[in-house]
Image (cartoon, rainbow, N blue to C red):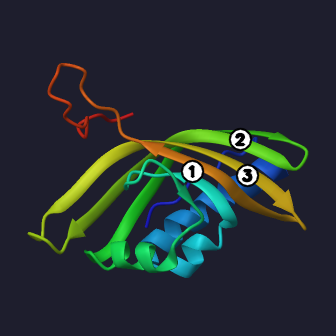
Amino acid sequence: MATVAMQTDVSKDEAEVLAVIDQLCRANHEKDAAGFAAMFVADVADYNLAPPLSHRGIDLREKQTWFDSWNGPVEIEARDFEVTVSGDVAFCHGFMHMNATSKTGARLVSFWMRSTLHLKREAGEWRITHSHTSVPFYMDGSLRPAFDLIP
Protein backbone atom coordinates (compact mmCIF):
# COMPACT_ATOMS: atom_id res chain seq x y z
CA MET A 1 0.00 0.00 0.00
CA ALA A 2 1.41 3.37 -1.03
CA THR A 3 1.33 6.34 1.28
CA VAL A 4 1.98 10.04 0.95
CA ALA A 5 5.69 10.77 0.94
CA MET A 6 6.25 12.85 4.07
CA GLN A 7 8.73 15.69 3.76
CA THR A 8 10.88 16.49 6.76
CA ASP A 9 10.38 20.26 6.52
CA VAL A 10 6.58 20.42 6.75
CA SER A 11 4.72 22.08 9.59
CA LYS A 12 2.60 20.13 12.06
CA ASP A 13 -0.56 21.34 10.28
CA GLU A 14 0.77 20.31 6.86
CA ALA A 15 1.72 16.90 8.25
CA GLU A 16 -1.80 16.47 9.65
CA VAL A 17 -3.33 17.32 6.25
CA LEU A 18 -0.99 14.86 4.52
CA ALA A 19 -2.05 12.27 7.11
CA VAL A 20 -5.69 12.74 6.01
CA ILE A 21 -4.63 11.98 2.42
CA ASP A 22 -2.73 8.94 3.68
CA GLN A 23 -5.88 7.77 5.49
CA LEU A 24 -7.84 8.12 2.23
CA CYS A 25 -5.26 5.90 0.51
CA ARG A 26 -5.53 3.36 3.35
CA ALA A 27 -9.37 3.34 3.23
CA ASN A 28 -9.24 2.70 -0.53
CA HIS A 29 -6.73 -0.13 -0.03
CA GLU A 30 -8.98 -1.71 2.62
CA LYS A 31 -12.13 -0.95 0.57
CA ASP A 32 -13.60 0.67 3.70
CA ALA A 33 -16.43 2.99 2.64
CA ALA A 34 -17.12 4.18 6.20
CA GLY A 35 -13.43 4.89 6.82
CA PHE A 36 -13.25 6.74 3.52
CA ALA A 37 -16.33 8.85 4.30
CA ALA A 38 -14.97 9.69 7.77
CA MET A 39 -12.34 11.92 6.12
CA PHE A 40 -15.07 14.20 4.72
CA VAL A 41 -17.63 16.59 6.20
CA ALA A 42 -21.19 15.30 5.80
CA ASP A 43 -22.08 17.76 3.02
CA VAL A 44 -18.74 17.70 1.16
CA ALA A 45 -18.78 19.20 -2.34
CA ASP A 46 -17.32 16.22 -4.22
CA TYR A 47 -16.37 16.51 -7.88
CA ASN A 48 -15.12 12.99 -8.47
CA LEU A 49 -14.76 10.97 -11.66
CA ALA A 50 -18.19 9.32 -11.47
CA PRO A 51 -21.37 10.92 -12.86
CA PRO A 52 -23.14 13.19 -12.19
CA LEU A 53 -20.99 16.32 -12.48
CA SER A 54 -21.09 16.92 -8.72
CA HIS A 55 -21.99 15.11 -5.54
CA ARG A 56 -22.99 16.38 -2.08
CA GLY A 57 -21.77 14.11 0.67
CA ILE A 58 -20.39 10.60 0.37
CA ASP A 59 -22.98 7.93 -0.42
CA LEU A 60 -21.72 4.94 1.59
CA ARG A 61 -23.70 2.36 -0.40
CA GLU A 62 -22.51 3.80 -3.72
CA LYS A 63 -18.90 3.90 -2.50
CA GLN A 64 -19.02 0.31 -1.20
CA THR A 65 -20.59 -0.88 -4.48
CA TRP A 66 -17.68 0.73 -6.32
CA PHE A 67 -15.15 -0.90 -3.96
CA ASP A 68 -16.86 -4.24 -4.48
CA SER A 69 -16.36 -3.95 -8.26
CA TRP A 70 -12.63 -4.61 -7.80
CA ASN A 71 -10.71 -7.83 -7.10
CA GLY A 72 -8.36 -7.24 -4.19
CA PRO A 73 -7.36 -3.83 -2.88
CA VAL A 74 -7.78 -0.51 -4.65
CA GLU A 75 -4.30 0.96 -4.45
CA ILE A 76 -4.07 4.75 -4.41
CA GLU A 77 -0.68 6.45 -4.31
CA ALA A 78 -0.62 10.18 -3.56
CA ARG A 79 2.30 12.11 -4.99
CA ASP A 80 3.59 15.68 -5.10
CA PHE A 81 0.94 17.19 -2.86
CA GLU A 82 1.51 20.85 -2.06
CA VAL A 83 -0.26 21.98 1.10
CA THR A 84 -1.12 25.52 2.17
CA VAL A 85 -2.53 26.06 5.66
CA SER A 86 -4.02 29.25 7.05
CA GLY A 87 -5.51 28.91 10.51
CA ASP A 88 -8.21 26.25 10.39
CA VAL A 89 -8.41 25.92 6.60
CA ALA A 90 -6.09 24.14 4.21
CA PHE A 91 -5.81 23.76 0.47
CA CYS A 92 -3.76 21.12 -1.30
CA HIS A 93 -3.27 19.70 -4.75
CA GLY A 94 -1.27 16.91 -6.29
CA PHE A 95 -1.59 13.63 -8.13
CA MET A 96 -3.09 10.27 -7.27
CA HIS A 97 -2.27 7.01 -9.00
CA MET A 98 -4.86 4.24 -8.98
CA ASN A 99 -4.01 0.56 -9.47
CA ALA A 100 -6.76 -2.03 -9.19
CA THR A 101 -8.00 -5.13 -10.97
CA SER A 102 -11.58 -4.95 -12.16
CA LYS A 103 -13.91 -7.88 -11.64
CA THR A 104 -15.26 -7.21 -15.12
CA GLY A 105 -12.75 -8.84 -17.42
CA ALA A 106 -10.21 -9.16 -14.57
CA ARG A 107 -8.06 -6.43 -16.11
CA LEU A 108 -5.63 -4.12 -14.36
CA VAL A 109 -6.72 -0.48 -14.32
CA SER A 110 -3.84 1.91 -13.75
CA PHE A 111 -3.84 5.67 -14.28
CA TRP A 112 -2.89 9.03 -12.78
CA MET A 113 -5.41 11.69 -11.89
CA ARG A 114 -5.25 15.24 -10.59
CA SER A 115 -6.61 15.97 -7.12
CA THR A 116 -7.45 19.20 -5.32
CA LEU A 117 -8.71 19.23 -1.73
CA HIS A 118 -9.97 21.90 0.65
CA LEU A 119 -10.02 20.96 4.33
CA LYS A 120 -11.32 22.59 7.48
CA ARG A 121 -10.20 21.87 11.04
CA GLU A 122 -13.02 21.55 13.57
CA ALA A 123 -12.51 20.36 17.14
CA GLY A 124 -8.88 19.61 16.26
CA GLU A 125 -9.73 17.29 13.33
CA TRP A 126 -9.12 18.01 9.65
CA ARG A 127 -11.99 17.04 7.33
CA ILE A 128 -12.31 17.49 3.58
CA THR A 129 -14.98 20.04 2.63
CA HIS A 130 -14.32 20.16 -1.13
CA SER A 131 -12.74 17.51 -3.35
CA HIS A 132 -12.06 17.70 -7.08
CA THR A 133 -10.54 14.85 -9.07
CA SER A 134 -10.01 14.88 -12.81
CA VAL A 135 -8.30 13.08 -15.66
CA PRO A 136 -7.15 15.15 -18.63
CA PHE A 137 -8.35 14.18 -22.09
CA TYR A 138 -6.79 14.57 -25.50
CA MET A 139 -7.92 17.70 -27.30
CA ASP A 140 -7.40 16.12 -30.76
CA GLY A 141 -11.11 15.47 -31.33
CA SER A 142 -10.94 11.91 -30.01
CA LEU A 143 -11.90 12.90 -26.43
CA ARG A 144 -9.80 9.96 -25.21
CA PRO A 145 -8.87 10.12 -21.51
CA ALA A 146 -5.12 10.66 -21.13
CA PHE A 147 -4.54 7.59 -18.96
CA ASP A 148 -0.99 7.32 -20.28
CA LEU A 149 0.29 10.49 -18.55
CA ILE A 150 2.73 10.16 -15.66
CA PRO A 151 3.79 13.06 -13.42
Q: Nearer the viewer, residue 68 or 21?
A: 68
Give residue 93's quadrant in the image.
top right
Task: Give the quadrant of the N terminus.
Answer: bottom left
At mark 3, the secondary structure is: strand
Instruction: Note whether 49 is above or below 27 in the view shown.
Output: above
Give the Cα separation between the discs numbered 1 and 2. 17 Å
Q: Amino acid at mark 1?
A: Ala
First in sequence: mark 2 vs mark 3? 2
Closer to viewer: mark 3 or mark 1: 3
The residue carrying mark 1 is 5
Question: Number of callouts in the render?
Answer: 3
Q: Nearer the viewer, residue 52 or 113?
A: 52
The residue carrying mark 3 is 119
At mark 2, the secondary structure is: strand
Q: Amino acid at mark 2?
A: Phe
Q: Position of residue 92 (x, y in %)?
A: 65, 41
**Label 1 environment density (alpha carbons within 10 Å; few <14, some 14–19, many ≥20):** few
First in sequence: mark 3 vs mark 1? 1
Q: Amino acid at mark 3?
A: Leu
First in sequence: mark 1 vs mark 2? 1
Residue 116 visible from this viewpoint: yes
The residue carrying mark 2 is 91
Tell me which residue sits at (28%, 31%) in the image. 137
Q: In screen coordinates, is 35 left or right of 79?
A: right
